[in-house]
Amino acid sequence: MLKEKANILRKDIIEMLFESQSGHPGGSLSACDIVTTLYFKEMNIDPKNPKWEDRDRLVLSKGHAAPVIYAALAEKGYFDKSELMKLRKTGEMLQGHPDMKGTPGVDMSTGSLGQGIAAANGIALGAKLQDKNYQVYTILGDGEVQEGIVWEAAMFAAHYKLDNLTAFIDYNGLQIDGKNEDVMNINPLDEKFKSFGWNVITIDGHDFDQISDAIDRSKNTKGKPTVIIAKTVKGKGVSFMENQAGWHGKAPSKEERDLAIKELGGVK
């Protein structure tokens, strides 16, 4: 079921980016299996009550990958799927980055890289102070980890023992300017987070069983936050987009849209 849902999300991502002729396919597609697992298996949420106080929260720290969140929210029933075709249109609900005031199901407005994990820290600490049991998840890009605020947040989360916080790093190895290791090497990422006091888990970010198992291990870890380093493929699911930095922020042409949808099992 999760594989089928992820495929639906990938097709919706391609369709909305083609329609808007703007947006970020590569990092949306690479995070798709993580997002699918969270929304359709792990998170305690209610589309009919998006402001439910005891819901689990998800903060998309890599806010430019908003299409994957929009696709999941629409598929989950937070709003009609016709809204997807209005992506990035002036005055419409789904803007280029998530807007918690304008979009049902979005828990935090994000866009400036690094700020999302900091906001997730605040939400998780708030839950602790209010004796709430909900989980807080955040998804970062690997290039985003080059931001200094990420490491301030890492320090904060460990200091306050935010064991209700799980951070995913969508580790696809590429950012807008090329390979992470060429732009600004972030490794050894696991050892860095360990040194900051985090529980660290490394997985295949396209293996649903590994994703779910890592979430279970995170929830069972007490006294420290967990980071799940998810090894992924940028542009996953569309052969000509896979492992191509050029697809970080480029919309497909009609021919590319048709080919992508065909690869994903659709008919155009």
Image: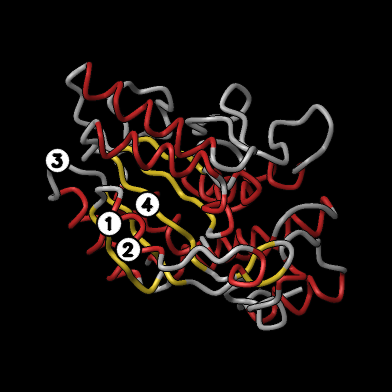
Q: Residue 141 versus residue 151: which sits nearer the camera?
A: 151
Mark 2 lies on residue: 191
Q: CA distance from mark 3 to mark 4?
A: 22 Å
Residue 108, percent from left and from top: 51, 30
The structure residue drawn at horizontal position 51% and vertical position 38%, both measured from the top left corner, is: 149
Task: Label 3: state its secondary structure.
Answer: loop
Q: Is residue 160 left or right of residue 233?
A: left
User: Is 239 situated above or below 48?
Assistant: below
Q: Earlier in the sequence, mark 2 or mark 4?
A: 4
Amino acid under disc 1: Lys
Q: CA distance from mark 3 to mark 1?
A: 14 Å
Badge 2, how many Cα within 10 Å: few under 14, some, many 20+? few
- Numbered mark located on residue 223 in the image: 3
Amino acid under disc 3: Gly
Number of labels in the image equals 4
- Numbered mark located on residue 38 in the image: 4
Task: Label 1: state its secondary structure.
Answer: helix
Q: Residue 101 versus residue 85: which sits nearer the camera?
A: 101
Amino acid under disc 2: Glu
Task: Label 2: state its secondary structure.
Answer: helix
Badge 3, how many Cα within 10 Å: few under 14, some, many 20+? some
- Mark 3 or mark 4: which is in front? 3
Q: CA distance from mark 1 to mark 4?
A: 24 Å
- Mark 3 or mark 1: which is in front? 1
